[in-house]
Image (cartoon, helix red, strand yellow):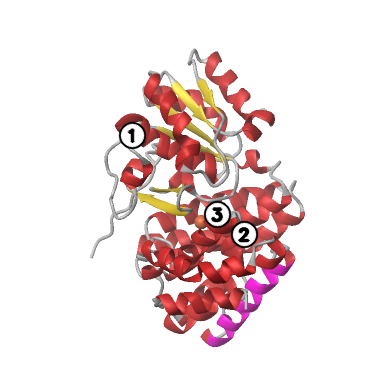
Amino acid sequence: MSTQVILPRILEVGAGASQKLPAILSALDCRKPLIVTDKMMVKLGYAGRLQDALASADIASDLFDDTVPEPTAASIQAGVDKVRGGDYDAIVALGGGSPIDSAKAIAILGKHGGKVRDYKFPRVVNEAGLPIVAIPTTAGTGSEVTRFTIITDETSDEKMLCVGIGFMPVAALVDYELTLSVPQRTTADTGIDSLTHAIEAYVSRKANPYSDSQAIAAMHLLGPNLQRAYHNGDDRQAREAMMLGATLAGVAFSNASVALVHGMSRPIGAFFHVPHGLSNAMLLPTVTAYSIPAAPERYATCARAIGAAGHDDDTDTANGKLLEALEALNRDLKVPTLAEFGADKARFDQLLPTMAEQALASGSPGNNPRVPSAEEIIELYRKIWP
Ligand SMILES: [Fe+2]
């Protein structure tokens, strides 16, 4: 049996990769890019530096810096209107997962019209939008190498998963130097997201030899370096390993899918406005404990790859150590509970059936080694907030 692997056409990886933007746009024959980013990237000078580099290469660019965290259909509309009213031939997506996800939706809607809901899974969006050059500034969602975007419907709080080659950037410039200034909390949240991508891709029912190789490599990079980067943001070696690990984890899950943690995490994010990586972190130990019995060998391999268990540990021992390590990681990275985050318990209890329904509808729980019923998902939610 063969597996189809979908990747960006160009990957530029390492220190200074983002400065290659003018040459890469020229190679793609793009002359009028719109940079889609957020206010922080402008404030940090990253957007200006790119625009200066483009101007020196005689490439005139425009800026759309109104993307927001956890983007909604309404939040991207001004960007879509800008594309529809302009003559842009490329989108440069600069920032963390939210600006890149926003840019992906803008690239499709800007070219083909309609509403985000029209493009939601299970529709597969294989038509080409404007070509996207993604420059991630966190390590990270891996959005620079995935064929997915997530946009929230602000009227229903549903996180709409959109899937297809149309959302795959044509190029990704993976420059860890852009992550050196990432604050500690974001380093933790985005790093746990990457680790979750690698683990979920590896245990996914859609895992394949290609995605496995990327997931294992990602875990080897992320496991020993997440806490290092969190405790010392200036640790260049740790930052470089995290950035490459995040991108490889993105390749892994884009070609194998995520699973139950992500399925259950999106409704928490949408209803309680918990950052994506943080809601993953809240769920990861509990969902892993639930899933291990259905794929013990796979989880034991994860334990060894992230350095939580040794090669001499048998499967059960390794899995015990994995659960301990995930809980210790959350403590070290100061991951709050939902209560500590400030969510409302009565609302949480009331929303349980809706969250379970949305989790199942996303399709991700169906990729989990142990596929839960709606009732079991509710039980798992209750375990993280008894
Ligand atoms: Fe994620």
Amino acid tagged 1: Gly
Q: Which residue is mark 3?
A: 245
Image coordinates of residue 97 in percent, x first then y, are 53, 45
Residue pictured at 30% horizontal, 36% vertical: 128
- Distance, label 1 to label 2, CA atoms, is 31 Å
SS at mark 2? Answer: helix
Q: Which residue is mark 2?
A: 278
SS at mark 1? Answer: loop
Image coordinates of residue 81 in percent, x first then y, are 42, 26
The verdict on residue 327 being magenta is: yes
Say whether disc 1 or disc 2 marks the residue closer to the N-terminus.
1
Q: Is residue 356 above or below residue 317?
A: above
Image coordinates of residue 107 in percent, x first then y, are 39, 34
Nearer to us of marks 3 and 1 is 1
Residue pictured at 65% horizontal, 43% vertical: 179
Q: Are marks 1 and 2 in contact (CB under 8 Å)?
A: no
Q: Is residue 358 above or below residue 309?
A: above
